[in-house]
Image: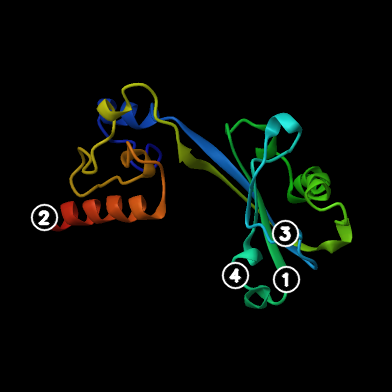
Amino acid sequence: MAKIAPDLPQDYLRGLLDLKSLGAVVLIMALKHQLSEQGYYWFNLPKAAGFPFLALVEHTNFLPKERFGGDHIIYCGDYLETDHEYFSLTQEQLTERFMPALKRINPAFQPDWVRATWLNKTNYAQPVPLVNHSQNIPAIQTPLPGLYFASMSQVYPWDRGTNFAVQIARRAARQMLEA
């Protein structure tokens, strides 16, 4: 918002720039074989145990692989500071970094199980509310006429989630319609 609306008053702009968040790095893999032999959908992985990412999700243990051309779809994701090394690594480098962890989930895993990969990175994925965040939530209607701001940092005290994203979007739409 600060980049697209540099004419915002300094106090509102400062409030936006003071919001804390984490970025996300997600590597999606199409596998020839199921990774979790037990059929687990979601793994929360401890970094202290040497896992290179926080979450491993085998999406095709929730939806059938036929919806994905017969591939088993997994994603390996993490929330990170935007200056973390992962933000500068290529798709190939992250794939190489993440693959050994897959063998820890399934000892039979082999690199040739990977048919394709896709890498997604974003600087803003998880708001981090600091002390007194409730007093620093930016208004949806900005000081500039006709400009509105709705983000996951405004759903506090709730954590981000689709239902809260819809709720904040409806509040923003209602304010726009009433203007």
Label 1, secondary structure: give it.
loop
Secondary element under disc 2, as helix, strand or loop, is: helix
Looking at the image, is mark 1 or mark 4 nearer the viewer? 4
- Whether tag 1 and tag 4 are in contact, CB under 8 A, the answer is no
Image position, residue 88 (x, y; %): 69, 38
Q: Is residue 35 left or right of residue 149?
A: right
Question: Looking at the picture, does residue 140 appear above or below residue 173?
Answer: above
Amino acid type, mark 1: Asp
Q: CB atoms at circles 1 and 2 under 8 Å apart?
A: no
Crowd around label 4: few <14 · some 14–19 · many ≥20 (10 Å) = few
Q: Quadrant of residue 162?
A: bottom left
> Which kind of residue does numbered mark 2 sit on?
Glu
User: What's the distance in space between the residues labelled 4 and 2, CA to CA?
Assistant: 41 Å
Circle on res. 63: 4
Distance between mark 4 and mark 3 Cα atoms: 15 Å
Residue 117 % position (x, y): 73, 59
Disc 3 residue type? Answer: Gln
For label 3, the crowd category at 10 Å Cα-Cα, with few meaning under 14, some 14 to 19 and many 20 or more, is few
Q: Say which residue appears at 52% left-offset and 35% top-offset.
A: 22
**Which marked residue is nearer to the observer: mark 2 or mark 3?**
3
Q: Quadrant of the N terminus?
A: top left
Residue at the (48%, 40%) spot, across then down:
126
Is disc 4 placed on a helix, strand or loop?
loop
Q: Are marks 3 and 1 in contact (CB under 8 Å)?
A: no
Q: For marks 3 and 1, give the CA distance.
A: 17 Å
> As displayed, is residue 57 above or below residue 132?
below
Q: CA distance from mark 1 to mark 2?
A: 48 Å
- Tell me the SS state at disc 3: loop
Q: Which residue is mark 3?
A: 38
Identify the residue position indicated by label 2 in the image. Answer: 178
Give the Cα distance between marks 2 and 3.
52 Å
